[in-house]
Amino acid sequence: MIHELFNLQNQTAVVIGGTGALGGAIAEALAAAGARVCIVGRNAERGEERVRKIGSSGGAARFLAADALRRDDLESVRETILHDHDSIKILVNAAGGNSPAATLAPGAEFSALELDGWREVFDLNLVGGVLLPCQVFGEPMLQAKSGSIINIASMAGMTPLSRVVAYSAAKAAVLNLTQFLAREWAERGVRVNALSPGFFPAEQNRALLFNPEGGYTERGAQIIAHTPMRRFGAAPELAGAALWLASARASGFVTGQNIVVDGGFSCVTI
């Protein structure tokens, strides 16, 4: 019975941003549960590397190149997938990130933040990160009256972090859009939820968290001190929550929710 709760055998899953650390870990978990995983991203080298890793563990995966900010790219990928498979059951939107152009330097004034940097971060996290993929891949899910969409948000979308103002605001918008789509699509068989990771070391933020010698930076030490579990997260720890949301047997009555995986960071108020 327990095994059946998380059995995704022969279900097709699309993981946008599966070339990254968190998206890749989720892709691996879905494949281990039996899903046929389609990794979508811009970096073919990292995408194919992830496919090989999944294949070496006995899973089924393929890489399809696309820019999540280009609707025609996403539509082309969708048609390719539906040509080979009868439906898409799972969509994970894991593309996103921050930009130095939208990050306030220590002591900098918010009024000096450039609009181009703000737009870049909103496009990356909201438009390409959730809006366009949900429109493109949500369509066949609605037609089939079945599907689970998992948007990767951030605990920064719940409590704005210092300096990364545009990123925090964009992830707050991701959470709002998640709830909107959950409400709109609930009676049409499509569940929409979000995962909000805390601090997970990856290529993008490693220099922020660790110094070259391997110890914590001042910022990294502050984060650890604010985290009740006194450590950063590991990518597979996010994948388990994603697997639960992906499975209709395990979470079929769950929609419009934000599952926070942050070691307790967001529950500390001082």
Image: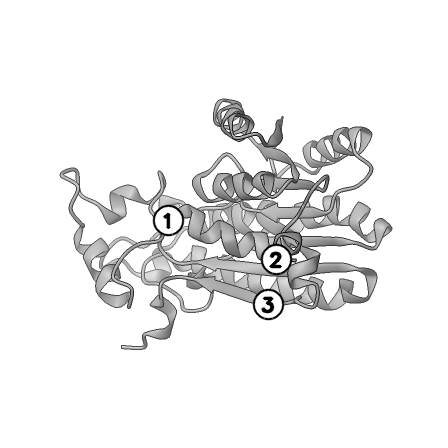
Q: Residue at x 79, y 33 (%)?
A: 85
| Amino acid marked by disc 3 | Gln
- Residue 149 is situated, as x and y percent measured from the top left of the image, at 66, 53
Q: Is residue 240 left or right of residue 8?
A: left
Q: Is residue 254 left or right of residue 109?
A: right
Q: Is residue 209 above or below residue 19?
A: below
Residue 174 shows up from this direction: no
Which secondary structure lies at badge 3? loop
Q: Quadrant of the C terminus?
A: bottom left
Residue type, numbered disc 2: Ile
Q: Nearer the viewer, residue 206 or 25?
A: 25
In the foreground, 164 or 116: 164
> Which disc is residue 2 wearing?
2
Residue designated by label 3? 257
Residue drawn at point x = 68 percent, y = 66 percent: 180
Residue 234's disc is 1
Please identify, in this view, whether the residue under mark 3 or under mark 2 is nearer the observer: 2
Tell me where residue 166 appears, x and y as whole percent. 44, 56
